[in-house]
Amino acid sequence: MTGAVTSKLAENVVHFTRLLRGAGLRLGPASGLEAIAAAASVDVLHRDELYWALHSVLVKRPEDFDLYDQAFRLFWRDPTRSQAVLEQLLQHVRVPPAPAISRRVSEAWRKPAASGKAPPERHEVDAVLTFSTDEVLRTRDFDQMSADELARAKRIVAQMSVVQRPVRTRRFTPDPHGERLDLARTVRDSRKTFGDLAPLRFRTRVLLPPPLVVLCDISGSMGRYSEMLLHFLHALQNARTRVHTFLFATRLTNVTRTLRRRDVDEALKRCGQEVQDWSGGTRLRACLRDFNRTWSRRVLGQGAVVLLVTDGLDRDPEPGLDAEADRLHRSCRRLIWLNPLLRWEGFQPRAQGVRALLPHVDEHRPVHNLDSLEALGRALG
């Protein structure tokens, strides 16, 4: 009897690994063997032990935490969807249904079609007046995208270009049609003619796009949105200079140099290794205070524009978020708040953190799909 139970456990662990691979997790053939060994090393009657044992070998990236959690709750409650195969092992476990199942997990959960059925007929459809898949994809919420749609969205994000409108700086450059007389060059050139008929030299102000500083929330409530924003910021940093990126949840981390790597997968992998507070709580006040005291003077010069990417759900019990947001607003040219919660039509600023931030931002924009990212690019331009 013990051998049969062990065999059934190994079979379902392999099935669970395939489910995660279908949902988009980067797992190879060896992951199933590692998962079997991890499950065999713990007491499977205790759900938490099995959960963290499989988590330690199957979750490779911080952005996969939520998908793993949803898949685990769904699979180990009913592995075959028709009967509980692991009822003998997990008979004392009663897992409540997850409040929301990611579309990637639900698609990977579907059973493959029976091989004996004939392939469906193919019909020719005139699509002149229909929407393309990419056009439909632009309005779909990042959190509701399937694995294929998410991969296609990442490719679209990588091709986005943001051209900021240049602003006048304090520096000057020689310009024969400039509006100001360049007295120093005029006097210097007059030495060649000993002051006789000295040509007049002119100059004009240098126009440069302002620096862009991004403070991106990577707490658990941000989930898929922060992942897509990182792809957007990677494309932005590789397309132009003077872009600074900071990630925060319970602490602030500067990842500007890391995101400058050409390969986006390598850059995000390094970010996962450097940042220690992925998918945690949010200490917005403490992180803004750290930025204002440590980084503000370094990166907010020359009229920088600040993008604050967060849902405003602050877990810091100490007061002072209003003062830190006000200081940040006064230190930059423009403060733009990107909030994924604005995707809801009935959004109301009821959270304490949201009410503290709103009076100190110049714009409050949604960031939940491709259309919102493109609108952001147009606004910056």
Image (cartoon, grey):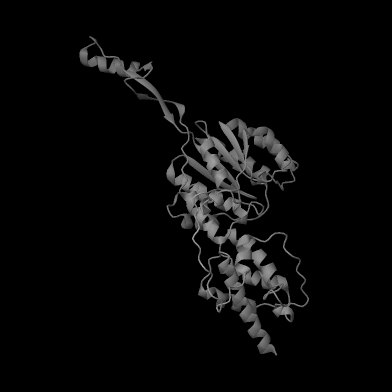
Camera-side residue: 88 or 305?
A: 88
Camera-side residue: 72 or 118?
A: 118
Residue 275, by quadrant, is bottom right
- Residue at 68%, 42% (x, y): give it: 285
- Residue at 68%, 36% (x, y): give it: 358
Placement of the N terminus among the 4 image quadrants: bottom right
Count of numbered tags = 0
Position of residue 288 measured from the top left corner of the image (x, y, whole percent): 63, 41
As drawn, the residue found furthest toward the left would be: 193
Give the left or right position of residue 88, taking residue 123 as reference: right
Position of residue 376 measured from the top left corner of the image (x, y, whole percent): 55, 40
Whether residue 199 is visible to the viewer of this picture, yes or no, is yes
Position of residue 40 measured from the top left corner of the image (x, y, whole percent): 64, 80
- Residue at 54%, 75% (x, y): give it: 118
As drawn, the residue found furthest toward the bottom would be: 1
As displayed, is residue 40 above or below residue 341?
Answer: below
As drawn, the residue found furthest toward the top would be: 196
Residue 74, by quadrant, is bottom right
Position of residue 153 measured from the top left corner of the image (x, y, whole percent): 52, 53
Whether residue 332 is visible to the viewer of this picture, yes or no, is no
- Residue at 21%, 16% (x, y): give it: 192
As displayed, is residue 64 above or below residue 314?
Answer: below
